[in-house]
Image: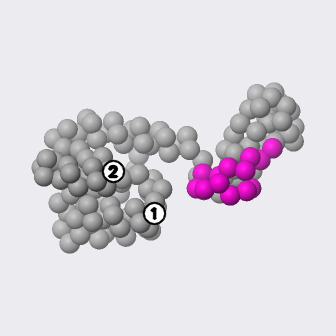
Amino acid sequence: EGLAVLEAADGAEAVQIGLQQRPGLALLDVQMPRLGGIEAAITLRELRPELRIALSSAQPAAHRRQALELQLPLFDKLEIERSMRWLAVQARQLRETPRPGTFSLRCAGCGYGVARPTPPERCPMCQAENTWLRTAERRLGRAPA
């Protein structure tokens, strides 16, 4: 899926990496030293609400209730396939979702839509030039463009 892996030695470092490197996804081990994965997830969610976070544990039954309350996916460390599928789906959705600062643009000629900071010179569908209309919707909120 073309994902880059950023590794943290503990939960505090995971929070630091989350703020400095700004990844789109985080899979946190519940049993990390200094700051556990659940605490790191809560902190990251407060500071970066757009970050997609999941938890991993060798004892998922012990943390299931808290993960449900926090609405965080929880994976058993032994079920690597499930966590990898979640990461792949989330990565695909991130690639398809416009980043903050990109605008939804629609061709006035044919209605084709793109999401980028600047419009392309020509519409890839109808080849019309300079027909782009900006919509008022942004990824993070609904501020006018």
Quadrant assignment, res 11: bottom left
Is residue 2 depicted above or below 112 in this figure?
below
Q: Which residues are magenta?
A: 133-145
Residue at x 25%, y 61% (from the top left corner):
37
- Foreground residue, 65 or 52? 65
Is residue 83 depicted above or below 53 in this figure?
above
Taking the magenta stretch, the answer to whether it contains residue 13 is no
Residue at x 20%, y 72% (from the top left corner):
34
Q: Is residue 58 visible?
A: no
Q: Is residue 133 visible?
A: yes
- Relative placement, left or right, of 55 versus 116 is left
How far across and down, in percent of the image, does residue 120 sit?
77, 43
Q: Quadrant of the N terminus?
A: top left
How far across and down, in percent of the image, does residue 65 sit?
20, 51
- Foreground residue, 81 or 52? 52
Quadrant assignment, res 23: bottom left
Q: Quadrant of the C terminus?
A: bottom right
For the residue labelled by badge 1, is the local secondary structure a helix, a strand or a loop?
loop
Q: Which residue is the site of mark 1?
A: 48
Q: CA distance from mark 1 to mark 2?
A: 15 Å
Amino acid on which disc 1 is placed: Arg
Amino acid on which disc 2 is placed: Gln
- Foreground residue, 83 or 46? 46
- Foreground residue, 127 or 141? 141
Residue at x 28%, y 41% (from the top left corner):
83
Q: Which residue is the site of mark 2?
A: 71
